[in-house]
Image: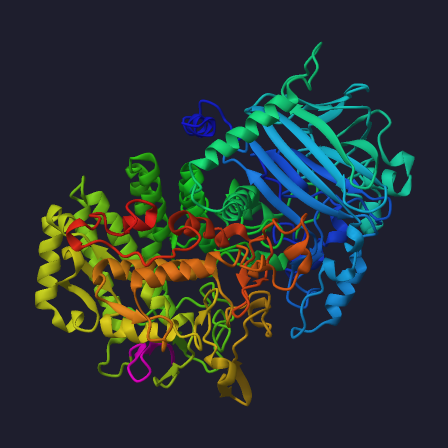
Amino acid sequence: MTNEEIRLAESRTRKKHWKRWGPYLSERAWGTVREDYSPHGNAWEYLPHDHARSRAYRWNEDGLAGISDRRQMICFALALWNERDPILKERIFGLTGNEGNHGEDVKEYYFYLDSTPSHSYMKYLYKYPQAEFPYAKLVEENRRRDKRQPEFELLDTGLFEEDRYFDVFVEYAKADVEDILIKITVTNRGPDAANLRVLPTVWFRNTWSWGHRDRRPTLHKSRPAPNPVIELNLSQVSQTQSETRWLHCEGSPELLFTENETNARRLFGIENLARFVKDGINDHIVHGVKESVNPEHVGSKAAAHYKLSVGSGETVVIRMRLADSNFKGKNAFDAFEKTFALRRREADEFYATVIPQDLSADAKNVMRQGFAGMLWSKQFYHYVIKDWLRGDPDNPGPPEARRKGRNHQWTHLYNADVISMPDKWEYPWYAAWDLAFHCIPLALVDPDFAKEQLTLMLREWYMHPNGQIPAYEWAFGDVNPPVHAWAAWRVYKIDKKRSGRGDREFLKRIFHKLMLNFTWWVNRKDAEGMNIFQGGFLGLDNIGVFDRGAPLPTGGYLEQSDGTSWMAMYTLNLLAIAMELAKEEPCYEDVASKFWEHFVYIAHAMSHRGHNSIGLWNEEDGFFYDVLKLPDGSHVPMKIRSLVGLIPLFAVETLEPEVLDRLPDFKRRLEWFIDNRPDLTDNFACMRSEGMGERRLLSIANEDQLRRILSYMLDELEFLSPHGIRALSQFHREHPYVLHVKGTEHRVDYEPGESLTGIFGGNSNWRGPIWFPVNFLLVESLQKFHHYLGNDFKVEFPTGSGNMKTLWDVADELSRRMTNIFLRDEKGQRPVFGNLQKFQTDPHWRDLILFYEYFHGDSGSGVGASHQTGWTGVVTKLMQQSGEFRKNNKTEPAAATAPASGIESWDGASVPR
């Protein structure tokens, strides 16, 4: 075991709490639903960026390159001032959903460079301009632009010309659980010397202004310069860990103290409750207001003020140590560099066990930063709906309207946990279906955390009593695709491969909770009890001609191909879990039979053509569509070639003959059903025929349907892009889908980049771009089909080329196209950065990777949230299992020697060669 693996084991057994401290500070707490107490739910406007420096947050803190303990009692982050900006740079800036021409958008350049799972070592980079930061210009220019114009970015302002900026690296190394070494390295990339104020800041989350003013922690100056010390005392706050910490500051910085209290005078024109307020240090540094900081050197927020003059190309290092020791009589910085070097070396040793050694240095760098982004995107998320609706003592009550407004039906919800975020600036709140995908790459480096995350969403203080999983804070009652079971099964298998044992207790616990959620789906989203499901927008925002999350302008409802397919996939995932558990506990065989039969009914309904009914499969076109059911009972297929018609491919599972032989009751029931209910099993792949290795196949799509769907999916004039599978066929570039309803035109056009419409907020686009989560599932599905159909089943790739490939090779090629988005091509260019020459050619930018929310359907350039390592982080799993590319066609061995564990190859076990 590597030393990092030992730390993870100690954390798992609670021998040592190595994860007590981590990057749990958000990049943005302002503009969130949690902090919104407005009458009409205007979260962006209620607490905007301009208020953030002056207003105490109720629920979460934010900061630049920050860390906190896992309950966020103590926070540490960086503040900077270039002596030109109107405010301290204490947090990342971006546009609100109403300011951006394509919705909310971060407008800074920062990068997650490294992190171990225990956060024993972490590294972050922020690029700080030396000229005045153009806050107003960014807002004004983006407001001026419409949706057909690109976003106006910080690079577009010319601020980085002549490289007049600082590279500010922040590194953390844990000497022990409560002993964190901090190194801040500043390099002037510009041609001239430049001044910089660096203010490492420590503070307490404000837990006392909400009816607990008697429980107020304090910090004070306990030792003067040189090497001054700030003492943090938590004795007034209930804490399980030790009550006192010390922040040791090397050198002779000035220590500045204030309170983490709202500056009500600035914001509301009324008197402050406290003499010193949150923006006191800002006013002292930027405006020279001496009385804005506490001369007694006491408060709940403090900063060490370092004044630097950095020559061109020069580097300056600041060292600090946050520890549970005051090091009396000792130098807190002894062995500092030795500890840092050790932790870096241990990080390298750990990732050598995860990242394939045959990858190029470039690919290894992409994987390493991918994992860093996943691990840096953890955040302490705090939101108690009951308190939020009711309001707090000593504070104005919330408007009466909110008692029947957003999230009012989720009063049981009590969130106060470290959770994996999609993006800590654009999406600083968990999203249930995003989280499921996060857990796949997380399982490669920290399966315990991945399992904890999946289990957490199903705990009684998250899951609704009716069985619904909370979606996200903007609307917990929205419906996301049910991918939790898939993720649990995948994480179980990844963990089993890496550890050598399957965590059956985890699998059993989550299976029982998932059955509650499955029941909710069946009872709430099957309008007529006919196994055709709705669900609303289902995470695909603007993919339909209507906003699928709102009442239809036609009346009636949509019978959704994707909603029904997700449910078919859900049944197969639960079937696979039940069969795994039944290997040792036969009582699960009956449950497995239940899910097998449920799948049969759903698959039959999707293709059924019976009395007064229409299936979702369109025989004429050879594609699955949503069907609009109108109030008069008529049905209208919505003939849009989109992911909606590809998602049925996700509902596929293969079963091994030896597994069936170990489960005689299940096998007997299965065979009876096949023999006696041909009316239900004739229209889809129903397990009657044995495939390669005598496997059985469960799939919505039969062989003929599979070929017809793939002829669209693998056509470069339709779905197939040089960078993956598009969310919408580019057929609709020249042939938009148009529907007129009551004098209004509704249409779907191929839009490969940013959304050109405002449906569902307009900041995400499923009408042409490439999205990694669904592409990842398509790759997996093709591998599963190949596992049954074998080498004799081939399709044209690309369609019309005459080049025939097995499905395994097709999956391999799609993986290659996706991973190549991030890798340098033969010209040294990364498709992800498009025409951003600074990122393509500058030696200080070209190896910094951003993992965007989605990617341009034609060019592969990054679009949407720029730091959504989240589900885009599955690229690390693709690279781990498939490498960069494969020059030779590699196919699965003959049936007699094929792996006996089904799709285990997908989990890094016996990859077919």
Q: Quadrant of the N terminus?
A: top left
Residue nearest the viewer, comparing 371 with 253? 371
Q: Quadrant of residue 617?
A: bottom left
**Where 319 sits versus 579, above or below?**
above
Is residue 62 shown to the viewer in this render?
A: no
Residue nearest the viewer, comparing 865 with 266? 865
Is residue 247 shown to the viewer in this render?
A: yes
Question: Where residue 828 appears, x then y in whole percent?
Answer: 58, 57
Q: Quadrant of residue 216?
A: top right
Question: Where residue 792 appears, x then y in whole percent?
Answer: 21, 65
Q: Is residue 508 found inside the magenta-colored segment of the image? A: no
Q: Is residue 628 found inside the magenta-colored segment of the image? A: yes
Q: Residue furthest bottom?
A: 743
Q: Which residues are magenta?
A: 615-629
**For this view, does 553 lie left or right of residue 484?**
right
Residue at left offset 33%, top offset 61%: 809
**For this view, does 911 lie left or right of residue 288?**
left
Residue nearest the viewer, comparing 72 with 151? 151
Question: Where residue 244 appears, x then y in whole percent?
Answer: 65, 21
Residue at left offset 45%, top offset 61%: 817
**Where 203 sits versus 676, above or below?**
above
**For this view, does 486 lie left or right of residue 156?**
left
